[in-house]
Amino acid sequence: MTKKITIEPVTRVEGHGKVTIHMDHQGNIQQTRLHIVEFRGFERFVQGRPYWEAPVLVQRLCGICPVSHHLAAAKALDVIVGAGTGEGLTPTGEKMRRLMHYGQFFQSHALHFFHLSAPDFLFGFDGDPAIRNIIGIALTKPELAVQGVMMRKFGQEIIRATAGKKIHGTGAIPGGINKNLSIEERDEFLKGADPLNADKMVSWAQEALDFFKYFYSSNKEMIDGFAHFPSNHLSLVRKDGALDLYHGVLRAVDTDGKKILHDIDYQEYTNYIEEEVRSWSYMKFPYLKSIGKENGWYRVGPLARLNTAEFIPTPLAQKEFEIYKALTNGKPNNYCLHMHYARLIETLHAAEVIRDLLNDPDLLGNDLVVKGTKQKEGVGLIEAPRGTLFHHYRINDNDQIEMANLIVSTTNNNEPMNRSVNYVAKAIMTGKEIITEGMMNSVEVAIRAYDPCLSCATHALGKMPLEISLYDEDNNLIDRKRS
Amino acid sequence: MSNLIKFKIDGVECMTERGKFIVEAALENGIFIPTLCNMPGVKPKGSCRICTVKINGRLMTSCTTPVADGMEVESNSTEINELRKSIVELLFVSGNHFCPACEKSGNCELQALGYLYQMMVPRYPYEFPLREVDADSPYIIKDQNRCILCKRCIKTIKDEQGRSLFAFRDRGHRLEVVLDKELAAEMTPELAELAMKNCPVGSILVKEKGFVEPIGKRKFDKTAIGSDVKL
């Protein structure tokens, strides 16, 4: 009998999605799909709104990384107000935005590692679901739980100081920023009471990374063997090839590390990237035009960034980057669960950047905004925690938005997430008569590695978590798990 | 006969000049009565009803009712505040007021009154009317989604010949405040700023000037509306 397994809702991810797995008589996996079942329509309802509302309006897509949307929209509008394509802002404007962004990275990555992913590593993929969560961590490893909460708090406070609010602030405006950092705010972050200061955050980020490396050293076979498959990788990189999460040129490499997108100006992204619509998901499937739909898909996010970047411009993270790169002999890393490793290196990098920026007097400056000759169209790209985020706006003669296109990080990861689900399902469910909760969680672990934000990806509204269902060959529902 | 008269608001002895309206006399005596359509220096109309008070058992708008000698006014009572809260809720549901992305958030008098009267979710169904955004003017945007028809702009935004740049159009449920396109073409940036400032909500926006005031520095970020009025 053929079975169809549905995992719905998928848990410990942002947004609502479900997985369906079809099995034939012999227990072979016939088809797997990650369905994104939400729909929102932000691209449509920003039409007609004044363009300067976009950074504040569109960030409402998400409560986890609204800063990324806020800044990507502001970057697109920088172009529209004639403030250049990423390098024209005042030092205070650019560095305040960078501080906001790295604060966001720090809190989002901490949230993902400590709250969403660590339970799988601490309690096992097939551990008791009752404790395989942040509460379980708080009960068994309280110091780790506190660390996670406080790291997130630090990042959120950085966002509050730069954007005005921890969630959905208004700091970035077209052409710059609406506030500088006060000396009191700076000193609080630099010299604040333990643990809420920049030095402590650097050391905690290093500890979190060391924790993962220790886990990896004892579970290398499991981690390396989990959903390992080749792919292309895409991200922004600084012009000199450094990791840069705020601004740069667009680069893609193939599975061997060969450049397939050659450091292009992202204002021209439509010449290189296309989105495919498939009937069974609200989430589109982007791909590189030059390679085509079949093989042009790519990964974004921490794994991709550390595959495209040539170095990390902060010393501690660079040292860890070298160790990490040595694992694959300098070639692109295609191990799905190494995304956690890469994410923690980025967390360390973010902590170092925050500390360095706080010591930069430019943050205290008063020259906040620049404007030039107005343009009708602008594109803003940024590396969101989950990967490359595209915002593209066109305005009419009356300053109203007439077109908006958003390609969200998780959308870029649509095909690789689907492939990861397929890989894991085949590896652990083939030939199995009974599908256990642990097996289904393993499918979720593969999705979770991408830290997907499903609401962002579809610009969607709905319940949060994800579901798996099992169907026979006549499409009758046999079993369903909703967690 | 002395021009000064005595009256009471919520039992507090007050004194004012004969002929003053309750709302301004209250302010002189350090008592806040909320207003939306009313503005100092502009002839009152009593259209928004938010300044409603109770006098001798009758509900009256305090912006249009002159103080009388010995008058006893009930304003800050549970009954009156509940009524004002209802008016705020009705204003919210009859337009499209999405505070999160509104430039006027933090400086909006309607939003501030929502906070003052602790409006959580309106008790009335949202109308979600289909309204236009008029962005033809070189300096301002008139967003009909947020207009509460207070007439402040009609009364205060005029050109050098005294002609109002704004006017009512249509009637009943379709009534709206529109901008005279010919006069708007001659509008100065200063007048545009004044129009935005006088608008109690986010219906009139100066073009290309969004969110320049950081959160924390806006009028009602840290203090409630009316808290600057001290008894």
Image (spheres, rainbow, N blue to C red):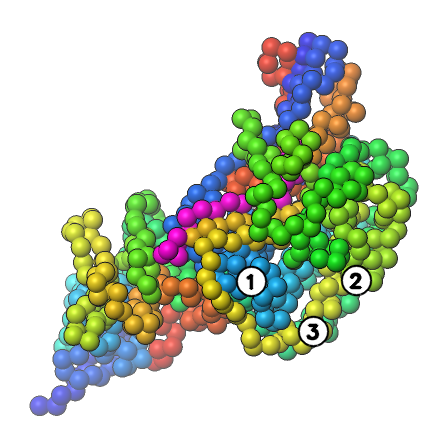
Give coordinates of residue B133: x percent, y percent: 32, 53
Taking A111 as reference, is B108 left or right? left
Distance between mark 1 and mark 3 Cα atoms = 23 Å
Nearer-N-terminus badge (2/3): 2
Magenta-tinted stretch: A396-415
**Residue position for label 2:** A314
Amino acid type at circle 2 is: Thr
Rendered image: mark on residue A154: none
In the image, farthest residue toward the right: A218
Residue B191, quarter of the rendered image: bottom left
**Residue position for label 3:** A360
Q: How crowded is mark 2: few (under 14 residues within 10 Å), some or many (20 or more)?
A: some
Note whether B35 is above or below A37 in the view shown: below
Distance between mark 2 and mark 3 Cα atoms = 15 Å
Q: Can residue A160 be seen in this view?
A: yes
Give coordinates of residue A153: x percent, y percent: 66, 60
Q: Which residue is depicted at the point 74% across and 61% down?
A: A351
Determine the chain carrying the residue at label 3: A
Determine the chain carrying the residue at label 1: A
Quadrant containing the N terminus of chain B is bottom left
* Same chain assignment for discs 2 and 3: yes
Amino acid type at circle 3 is: Asp
**Residue position for label 1:** A84
Under circle 3, the secondary element is loop
